[in-house]
Image (cartoon, grey):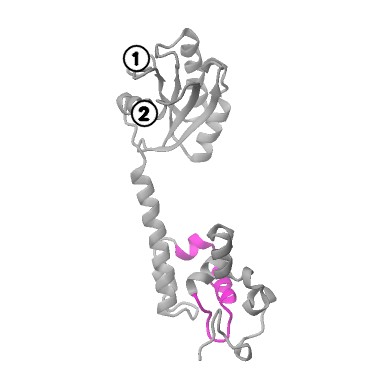
Amino acid sequence: MNGGADGESPRKRRRGPAVGRLAELAPEDRPREKLIGRGAAALSDEELVAVLLGTGRAGQPVLETARDLLRGTSLHGLLGDDPAIHLFGSRGVGAAKAARLVAAAEIARRLARAELDARPVVSGPEAAGDYLTNALAAETREVMGGLLLDARNRVVHDAVVFRGSATFAAVSPQPLFRMAVLRGAVGIVLYHNHPSGDPSPSPEDRATTDRFVRVGRDLGIEVRDHVVVGRGRWFSFRREGLL
């Protein structure tokens, strides 16, 4: 009978590194049990591939098979683009195992697309104002941050940089733009709220907005608007011609 991850006969196992032999691992450290006990995030790339494979090749434990598949590449290299071309019939991986890997890659792509599609689109002042009015409705303290946007005006992250009693003018641009760079954002909609209810910007708000615009210009990240939210009302710098 063909050997595998959990039921392979020791007499049929090819000798290999101890880390690749499931029988030599504590039960809680075997990939499937580790996933159940600690969650998928606790698994290495090799262990994730081993779980998907289920069993190894004839005479080879599943962790060794997973290691062989990943040798010289990465998960993206193994499963990216059109993995079926590389997996079916490749390196002794049969159609059933390859099909599981290809299906897992496609599920990941569809989940990523669904997450992108679900992100709010901020295409102008009205969309930004409506989104932020809802997002900040329950805030009783001043909140400052930025909506980080991709090239299609989708919100990749709502970055809050301060909550408290300080004014918008006291907030440094560096933390927000650092997050924008890390997230790959190409645009930012600045925002803060006025818990008093009146969204009219102060002279300090205007001067600070200009400072953020200059920093963004130097970094190649456009500040597309600054929205000030009051009680059920909002003020857009772009709509009022101040940007």
Whole-Å distance between the Cαs marked 2 and 1?
Answer: 24 Å
Q: Which image quadrant is residue 100 in? A: bottom left
Tell which of 109 and 135 is nearer to you.
135
Percent across and percent down for residue 243 are 39, 17
**Residue located 57% across and 29% down the image:** 175
Q: Does 70 lie within the magenta span?
A: yes
To which residue does mark 1 refer?
241
Secondary structure found at label 2:
helix
Percent across and percent down for residue 125 are 33, 24
* Residue stretch in magenta: 54-79
Residue type beneath disc 2? Asn
Local crowd size for mark 2, using a 10 Å CA cut-off: few (<14), some (14–19), many (≥20) = few
Percent across and percent down for residue 205 are 48, 13
Tell which of 155 and 67 is nearer to you.
155
Q: From the viewer's perspective, tell me whether residue 13 is left or right of residue 128.
A: right
**Residue located 38% across and 27% down the image:** 132
Residue 135, above or below 140: below
Which mark sits nearer the N-terminus, 2 or 1?
A: 2
Q: How many marks?
A: 2
**Residue located 63% across and 75% down the image:** 20
Residue type beneath disc 1? Gly
Q: Does 19 lie within the magenta span?
A: no
Tell which of 8 and 70 is nearer to you.
8
Secondary structure found at label 1:
loop
Percent across and percent down for residue 111 are 39, 54
**Residue located 63% across and 73% down the image:** 27
Residue 69, above or below 12: above
Local crowd size for mark 1, using a 10 Å CA cut-off: few (<14), some (14–19), many (≥20) = few
To which residue does mark 2 refer?
134
Q: From the viewer's perspective, tell me whether residue 172 is left or right of residue 83.
A: right
Q: From the viewer's perspective, tell me whether residue 191 is left or right of residue 35.
A: left
